[in-house]
Image (spheres, coloured by chain):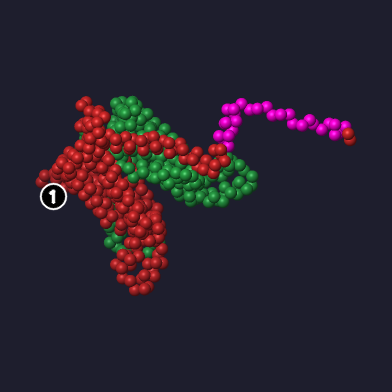
């Protein structure tokens, strides 16, 4: 579907892409600037080196990675199970279940965050890494479910039927036939879930306790205090990590299922 | 022969009675497995359980809290009162509410106007398509905090725009861009544009080009071809994109916090404020519940739009 495009649309699109990307490009560029101010004084990696010197940043990074991995694994498992149950089985209460899965997708982060805060405080749960992980799982499950379900519904079930006819039991069929076809979608969903967890600020800031800082919380503090180009450096790192994850996730969804 | 007959086994010995708990266990298991609903429920149960516990229950608690009285030292007293919802009649809070809705609608409309042509361009870009889509997807997933900081970096008084304009002698003094409504608007559009572009693109990509050819052959002019063929068929994407823009804008926190400041609070900032500095949890819960109300209203509008669009959903 590539007819010729009117010139104004091409020009307009170029401007929009510029608007979308220029701020980040500028941010990255000035993370290498040998000066605290905007004038370009030369190329330097000092701001990145400074990041390594700061124990709080390294700790926050570690925290973010830990929270990200744990919450992603749990959310992916629960979400995939949910997706399989919803995509393939009929049971009473199924419509209610579908609604339950989709509501978190449309709930604003601030609402999610404070409602969880209320729960944790009322239940007497100490706010810390455990509460952060629980919160991240909560908003990631729905997300993984939606992604994996789309993949499941696009899958050709005749391969499973063939396996069953040829004598395999359900367990073998699942692991030898179904999983190879859906794992790119599952992994793709997991990567995106990790990204969401890694970048989350609003919910995390509300349910975290003293001493349980993740990277976004630290970055927010830095942005408010307006310190040096180290912010640019950390932002660049976050952007690069995200882009790599998104690229991988994208490639996984492009792969055709083996026939 | 009679030996073979004599070797026939005795009639079955009477079966030993099984302990009652074994019988019960077997009966329950068979009952569960025999029901056709069992596998579905078993698969769905863990995830659903987690969501009920850590999503639904908190929301319900939030609603209950919004009706309670604020405790003296920041907790809650178990006395029911509608006072927190009534407070929204006050000028200050009505302003915040109206401002939030107005800015969210405005940002959505702007994103639609800006994003639609871009989505069209991507859908018709041929071999550049993947790259262009990737170019929209990456900002969508990049940390919102980092992207908002990028705007600050550009717009603050010591930022790139002002420095450039000053050095080019185009202005004498730095332009005060941050802490203004325009800054928040710009931030909202910048933040949510990818969420508008992508669904519209998905819709337009499915558009059958022969429909447009047919319209052209039948004599329709370009404007008519757009409004009567393309637009209606892209409505599912437009609806989805609008929803994905309006809802986060409504609950927006970071954009107005970092780009608008205390003078231009949106509801999200009010909620956060009540749960941190102001320590008025019931009031914050009420504000939060109002946000949910707005979100639900938007979802209902979306579902109506989707069901009315020709060709079914996205």
| Point 40% across, 65% down: residue | B209
Task: Please rate how many residues cluster around mark 1, counting C-alpha atoms within 10 Å: few if below 14, some from 14 to 19, many from 20.
Answer: few
Front-lying residue, A111 or A73: A111
**Residue A205 in sight in this render:** no
Q: Position of residue B46 (x, y in %)?
A: 46, 36
**Residue B40 horizontal side relative to residue A96, left or right:** right
Q: Position of residue B145 (x, y in %)?
A: 28, 39
Q: Position of residue B175 (x, y in %)?
A: 14, 45
Name the residue beneath numbered marker 1. B170
Question: Is residue B10 covered in magenta?
Answer: yes
| Point 49% across, 44% down: residue | A91
- Count of numbered marks: 1
For residue B210, which quarter of the picture? bottom left
Circle 1 — which element? Answer: loop
**Residue B61 in sight in this render:** yes
Question: Is residue B166 covered in magenta?
Answer: no
Chain hosting mark 1: B
Q: Position of residue B216 (x, y in %)?
A: 36, 71
**Residue A127 horizontal side relative to residue B101, left or right:** right
Asked if residue A7 is positioned above or below residue A120 in the image, the reply reads below
User: What is chain B's hue in the picture?
Assistant: red
| Point 39% across, 70% down: residue | B214
Which chain's colour is green?
Answer: A
Q: Start and end of the magenta stretch?
A: B3-30
- In the rendered image, the quadrant that contains the N terminus of chain A is bottom left
Front-lying residue, B306 or A182: B306
């Amino acid at each position: 579907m590539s007819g010729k495009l009117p010139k104004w649309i091409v020009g307009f699109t170029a401007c929009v892409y510029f608007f979308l990307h220029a701020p980040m490009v500028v941010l990255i560029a000035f993370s290498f600037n040998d000066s605290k101010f905007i004038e370009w004084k030369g190329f330097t990696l000092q701001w990145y080196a400074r990041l390594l010197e700061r124990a709080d940043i390294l700790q926050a990074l570690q925290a973010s990675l830990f929270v990200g991995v744990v919450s992603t694994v749990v959310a992916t498992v629960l979400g995939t199970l949910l997706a399989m149950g919803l995509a393939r089985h009929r049971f009473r209460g199924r419509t209610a279940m579908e609604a339950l899965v989709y509501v978190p997708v449309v709930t604003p982060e601030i609402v999610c965050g404070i409602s969880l805060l209320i729960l944790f405080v009322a239940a007497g749960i100490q706010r810390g890494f455990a509460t952060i992980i629980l919160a991240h799982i909560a908003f990631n499950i729905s997300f993984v479910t939606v992604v994996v379900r789309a993949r499941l519904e696009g899958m050709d079930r005749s391969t499973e039927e063939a396996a069953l006819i040829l004598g395999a039991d359900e367990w073998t069929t699942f692991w030898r036939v179904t999983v190879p076809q859906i794992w790119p979608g599952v992994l793709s969903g997991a990567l995106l879930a990790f990204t969401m967890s890694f970048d989350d600020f609003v919910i995390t800031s509300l349910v975290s306790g003293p001493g349980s800082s993740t990277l976004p919380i630290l970055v927010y503090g830095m942005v408010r205090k307006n310190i040096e180009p180290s912010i640019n450096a950390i932002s660049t790192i976050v952007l690069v990590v995200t882009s790599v994850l998104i690229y991988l996730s994208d490639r996984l969804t492009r792969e055709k299922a083996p026939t | 022969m009679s030996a073979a007959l004599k070797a026939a086994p005795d009639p079955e010995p009477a079966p030993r009675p099984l302990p009652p708990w074994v019988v019960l266990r077997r009966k329950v298991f068979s009952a569960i497995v025999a029901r056709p609903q069992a596998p579905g429920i078993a698969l769905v149960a863990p995830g659903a359980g987690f969501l009920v516990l850590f999503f639904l229950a908190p929301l319900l608690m939030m609603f209950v809290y919004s009706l309670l009285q604020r405790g003296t030292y920041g907790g809650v007293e178990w006395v029911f009162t509608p006072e927190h919802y009534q407070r929204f009649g006050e000028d200050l809070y009505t302003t915040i509410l109206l401002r939030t809705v107005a800015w969210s609608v405005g940002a959505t409309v702007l994103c639609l106007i800006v994003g639609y042509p871009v989505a069209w361009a991507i859908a018709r870009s041929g071999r550049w398509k993947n790259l262009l889509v990737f170019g929209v997807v990456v900002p969508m997933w990049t940390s919102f905090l980092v992207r908002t900081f990028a705007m600050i970096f550009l717009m603050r008084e010591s930022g790139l725009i002002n420095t450039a304009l000053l050095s080019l002698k185009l202005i004498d003094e730095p332009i005060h861009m941050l802490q203004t409504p325009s800054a928040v608007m710009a931030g909202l559009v910048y933040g949510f544009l990818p969420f508008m572009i992508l669904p519209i693109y998905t819709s337009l990509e499915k558009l059958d080009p022969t429909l447009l050819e047919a319209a052209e052959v039948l004599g329709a002019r370009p404007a008519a071809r757009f409004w009567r063929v393309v637009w209606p068929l892209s409505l599912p994407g437009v609806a989805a994109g609008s929803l994905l823009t309006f809802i986060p804008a409504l609950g927006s926190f970071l954009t107005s916090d970092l780009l608008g400041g205390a003078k231009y609070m949106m509801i999200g900032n009010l909620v956060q404020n009540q749960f941190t500095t102001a320590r008025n949890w019931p009031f914050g819960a009420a504000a939060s519940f109002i946000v949910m109300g707005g979100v639900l209203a938007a979802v209902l509008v979306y579902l109506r739009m989707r069901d009315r669009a020709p060709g079914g959903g996205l």
